[in-house]
Image: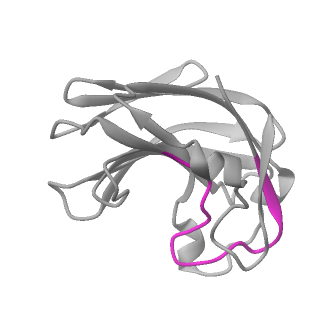
Amino acid sequence: MKNYPIKKGNHYASISIFDRLFNIGWKVKQISVSFKLSKECWWAPARNSDDYDLNKLVGISYGINDHSNSVRFAWAPDFDHNGVINIYGYVYDQLSSGHVSKPIVAVNVEEVNSGTIKVSGNQYILTVGTTTISMDNTHGDPNLCFRLYPYFGGNNTAPCDMVIGLEFN
């Protein structure tokens, strides 16, 4: 599993030049990953209302603008339960304004989890462990796509150094 650190005060994970050069795909309709969120990905209490924003874990962007046509897993701490992270489906669709999110499952920090994102016609099928949800995909996806890596935020930056482990299966 490859570690993607996010430094305190930053949004973006540290990504190697290799990852940046080889994140392009063609006609990708499914990705499967294993992921692990370090214990630093959970904190409490929330610093402000923006700590409830969703952080991005991993996904696919169709075309060059990830804010108009993408699907990914997102996460946020469950501030009421120590060490618990809520995982969401998160979609930007060019026909809607902004993003749409939907809860999938809660996981524990330092735990390895598996997830799959699949494009199936006009639906995105997102699975974490044994829990599956579907989200609307209201237009055809272009053939050119890009792998999306961890990003902290919303509005706030990372409250501390944290690490997200990812392995693409």
> Is 35 left, or right, of 102 in this rendering?
right
Q: Residue 44, percent across and down?
A: 76, 68
Res 165 → quadrant: top right
- The residue positioned 73% from the left and 61% from the top of the image is 14
> In front: 51, or 60?
60
- The residue positioned 55% from the left and 67% from the top of the image is 52
Res 151 → quadrant: bottom right
Of the 4 image quadrants, the one containing the N terminus is top right
Q: Residue 26, percent across and down?
A: 38, 32
Vertical arrangement, residue 154 with respect to residue 82, above or below: below
In magenta stretch: residue 119: no
Vertical arrangement, residue 56 with respect to residue 24, above or below: below
> Is 103 left, or right, of 100 in this rendering?
right
Q: Which residues are magenta?
A: 147-164
> Is 103 left, or right, of 125 in this rendering?
right
Of the 4 image quadrants, the one containing the C terminus is top right
